[in-house]
Image (cartoon, coloured by chain):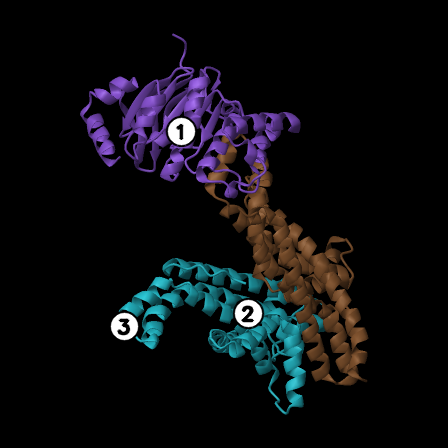
Chain colours: A cyan, B brown, C purple
Amino acid sequence: MLFGIEWDTSDNLTFAISILPILMRGLWVTLQAAVLGFFVAMVLGLVLAALKAVPARIVSWPTRVIAEFLRDTPLLIQLFFLYYVLPEFGLILPAFLTGALALGLQYSAYLSEVYRAGIEAVPRGQHEAARALDLTPRDTFIRIILPQAIPRIIPAMGNYLVAITKDVPILSVVTVLELLGVARIIGDRTFNYLVPLTMVGGIYLILTLLASYGVRRLDRSLPKTGIPLK
Amino acid sequence: MHWTEYLVPLGQGAWVTVQLTFWSTIFGAILSFAAGIGKLSGFAAIRWLSVSYIEIFRGTSLLVQLFWLYFALPIVGEMAGIDLRFSPVIVGILALSLNIGAYGAEVVRGSIQAVTRAQYEAARALNFTPRQTLFRIALPQAIPEMMPPFDNLAIQNLKDTALVSLITLGDLAFRAEQLRNFTQDSTTIFSLVLIMYFGMALVLTAMMRVLARMVGRWRQTGR
Amino acid sequence: MTDPIIKFDAVGKRFGSVTVLDGLDFEVAEGEKVTIIGPSGSGKSTILRILMTLESISDGVVYVGGEPLWHERKGGNFVPASESHLREMRRLLGMVFQSFNLFPHMTVLRNLTEAPVRVLGLSRAEARERGLELLDMVGLADQAKKFPHQLSGGQQQRVAIARALAMRPKIMLFDEPTSALDPELVGEVQAVIRQLAEEHDLTMLLVTHEMRFAREISDRVCFIDGGRIREEGAPEEFFTNPKEERTRDFLHAILADN
């Protein structure tokens, strides 16, 4: 029994049907973690991208090192770091929030690159044309550059949202009861890992196939793109 | 325990991580080429097999794959009457290779397709067979294009090795968790471990750069 | 008269709803040098691409050396050609492309030897000897070890001509061989083609916009428009006294440009 829902192990199919509602609870947590983590990544990524673009080397260079560090070290270790080290400094967060923060940190590094590539993909001539029309730098950025950059970055953002969803299972390590964590508990208690783990794989497959279909449709409906993933 | 004493067990773990990364990158690369070329095959069965492999391993989470191979595969084996229980090392390398190979396959496919039509036409005019065209004309031009995304995938693979600690394999992440349990000195241990992973990533990137220069030598000859 | 080495018999070619060749009849005798001219989109490059088997046909029959190119005879009937038949037929043909299409990852010499070794089964030494001879002929013997990107466009096109010749084809197809070149490099490539036309009994089919060059090297000039041959004849007669209205308009327009 988990979340007050009983399972029936009489045969694999009955078992599968009986645990589906439990797995759906886990999926709901997975999606929440992915969305919250992605939101953190979008905001932090913007900060990183902005700081990397600062002309003063003393700001841009350390930012670049930090972003590279976040990108090149394992999410699992970053998660452990936050989970065990933050409390030593008196910051005690629920496991779910710690997990979302870890996801957000890692993906902020990826997203900062997406933002940068999106802005750099706007042709130089657009900046020059805006200057020739005497627009202020602020207006140039908000009215000329951003409207052209955003459609270019949306498919890449969509791909990263899918990627972050696939990384959520790592949070099960710090006791977050997302999809995989729930499946493992069911497996531990029933000694039948095959059914719940295969179902998790199937649910992920359906989710990502739907998502990549969505990204492709979005991609087609948007003007020119061209930012590679990872 | 003084922090320098951590270095011995962490060093042992790091060595396991290096080996895991090495082998899964090699096997992953082989799978990348097999499935990437397979997806472009003229035989529907091979194409279908390649696409299924790529979609399944890109479409699900690595940790799910790892747990499935470790916990569920032996049960499948039991039902089929074969022994499919493997040691954590085998399962770890298997899961990492299969996962990274599926991502790499898309890189291989994309780079082969990016070779211009004109090159394929020239090859046809000179009467090369499709196989000769692939191996002698298309791949030598496509491989240098694959190197930057392969570099990213190799780094991804290095990071992913940390997950095998969760099936009791004694890599760097596993040793770190063990030490933390023993000493409760999380800050020092995890800072050290993060720096060690970062260092390994920098070395790996440098190695991939050397490799990229080797396969793309013909492009660098000056005028 | 001997059988033509190339014969288009009521050949049609459509891309979707666009008709590129419309019941084209066209013959080339062995050893003949024929230039095809015409406005862009008239289907002149398509003729070469069909012969090189880069483009299939929609109707009719193409014969090369008396054999159907895109068909095989089976029990008195024509059936679509198999890949092995196409491979057999391609041995007769060589092609020079507008944009050279050299293999960028191979040295100049390797570009010339790779196909003879892999396709014709020559030994490395034989292929090398043949390659160096041809490079000498196009005046690039000293560039053998360089890579294509280290050469000028004109040099690259001369290598491409040598590469096609290394396969010892009976028919050479030139698809606008000088259109992608800077004006000052056109001459060296034309000189090589001219030499080839004068000194060898190759059958040559050339698509070009260079009217003076066409006049110099051809035995016959064909004007194609709307997927059919509108007028053909010996160059002197063709250029000085065109009969058709369309030909006059075309020549007028193109000569005004030059």
Cα separation, mark 2 vs mark 3, equals 42 Å
Image quarter where the C terminus of chain A lies is bottom right
Seen in the picture, residue B219 relative to C203 is either above or below; the reply is: below
The residue furthest left is C245
Q: Identify the residue at image location x=38%, y=34%.
A: C186
Callout 1 crowding tier (Cα within 10 Å): few <14, some 14–19, many ≥20: some
Can you tell which quarter of the image residue B74 is in?
bottom right
Q: Give how far across and how far down residue A180 sits, in percent.
A: 63, 70
N-term mark: 2 or 3: 3
Q: Are marks 1 and 2 in contact (CB under 8 Å)?
A: no
User: Would you place residue B78 above or below residue A70 in this image?
Assistant: above
Q: Nearer the viewer, residue A34 or C137?
A: C137
Q: What residue does disc 3 label?
A: A134
SS class, disc 3: loop
- Looking at this view, name the residue that lies furthest to the top: C1
Say how many tags the image has. Answer: 3
Q: Are the residues under badges 3 and 1 in a single subunit? A: no
Amino acid, disc 2: Ile
Q: Residue at x 35, y 17 (%)?
A: C219
Q: Position of residue A229 (x, y in %)?
A: 51, 62
Q: Dot 1 lies on which element?
A: helix
Q: Which residue is mark 2?
A: A164
Local crowd at mark 3 within 10 Å, few (<14), some, or many (≥20)? Answer: few
Quadrant housing residue B209: bottom right
Q: In the image, what residue type sits under mark 3?
A: Asp
Q: Nearer the viewer, mark 2 or mark 3?
A: 3
The amino acid type of the residue labelled 1 equals Gln
**Do residues under tags 2 and 3 come within 8 Å of each other at their CB atoms?**
no
